[in-house]
Image: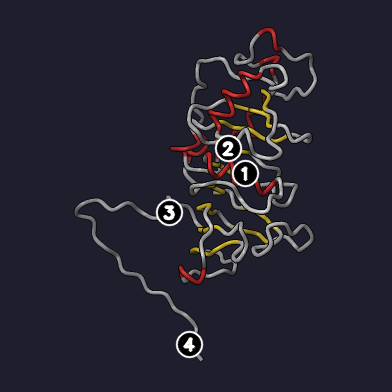
Amino acid sequence: MSDDHEKSTKLPERASPVEASLSRRGFLELAALTGVSLTAAGTPILRIANRNNNPYASEDHQSTGENKMSDEIIKEKTRRACLSGPASVTNAATVAEMDAQGKMVVLRPGTNQWVCMPGNENIIGDVPMCLDPMGMQWYMDIRARKPKPTNATPGLIYMLCGATQRSFTDPFDTTSPAIPIGPHWMVIWPFDPVASGLPTVMRDGGTMIMFAGTPWAHLHICGSPLDGNEYHSGDRAISTLTYAKPQK
């Protein structure tokens, strides 16, 4: 993976929103920035991590020590979160995670509409990811176990660190053995395998329809969109050959 994924950019020079219960205006600003739907069921309250040492937290909202997170932990979580998507997205993305109470904790404010999450490698299904606004809406809907997603247009979610999950057919399976999945990205829209001709079984490369036949069906593409080499005028083509078992 490119070293560009590990680069972080200078944080925006502006005041950052703090805990919603303390600042309604801050909540609205950050929700608009990150694309989190205010009307989604179970919408998280957003707060800033480690406000004691954070220059983006206003003086009248300084923490008294509760929910404090060390700078080193924030740095590592931010690094991990930013590995989940291409640098062109993650460099300016908001980095956030959900705490045990379901509140969204902002680890690094951003300037674009993407949100990157570090995940927890000790929990199956809690993986690093980077989501655009419609991807975030879809994600919040599935976390809330809604009957179907509410995003009205396609969304994007990157998981370029890979993932683990219980099933590729049942979005709410919590008991099956974990499935290891390589780096991939997703187009969040209800693709139909019959109409598209795309496969519906998990694979280690190429494209399949995850959760086919359910309202949560979406296009699952294994590999990074940045794989391969760019074409420039004058480049030569190199043909390759692969082998397969003979047909019976």
Q: CA distance from mark 3 to mark 1?
A: 19 Å
Q: Earlier in the sequence, mark 3 or mark 2?
A: 2
Are circles 4 and 2 on residues that touch, CB within 8 Å?
Answer: no
Q: CA distance from mark 4 to mark 3?
A: 29 Å
Q: Earlier in the sequence, mark 4 or mark 2?
A: 2
Q: In the rendering, at what x and y percent does residue 29 appear?
A: 57, 23
Q: Earlier in the sequence, mark 1 or mark 2?
A: 2
Q: Which residue is mark 3?
A: 227
Decide if residue 185 is in sight here. no
Badge 2: few (under 14), some or many (20 or more) residues near its Cα, within 10 Å? many
SS for callout 1: loop
SS for callout 4: loop
Q: Which residue is mark 1?
A: 128
Q: In the rendering, at what x and y percent does residue 217 appear?
A: 58, 59
Are circles 1 and 4 on residues that touch, CB within 8 Å?
Answer: no
Q: In screen coordinates, is 69 left or right of 185?
A: right
SS for callout 2: strand
Decide if residue 46 is in sight here. yes
Q: Which residue type carries mark 4?
A: Pro
| Of the two numbered discs 4 and 2 in the rendering, the one whose residue sits closer to the viewer | 2
Q: Which residue type carries mark 3?
A: Asp
| Of the two numbered discs 1 and 4 in the rendering, the one whose residue sits closer to the viewer | 1
Give residue 246's mark: 4
Q: Which residue is mark 2?
A: 116
Q: Which residue type carries mark 1?
A: Pro
Q: Nearer the viewer, residue 185 or 137?
A: 137
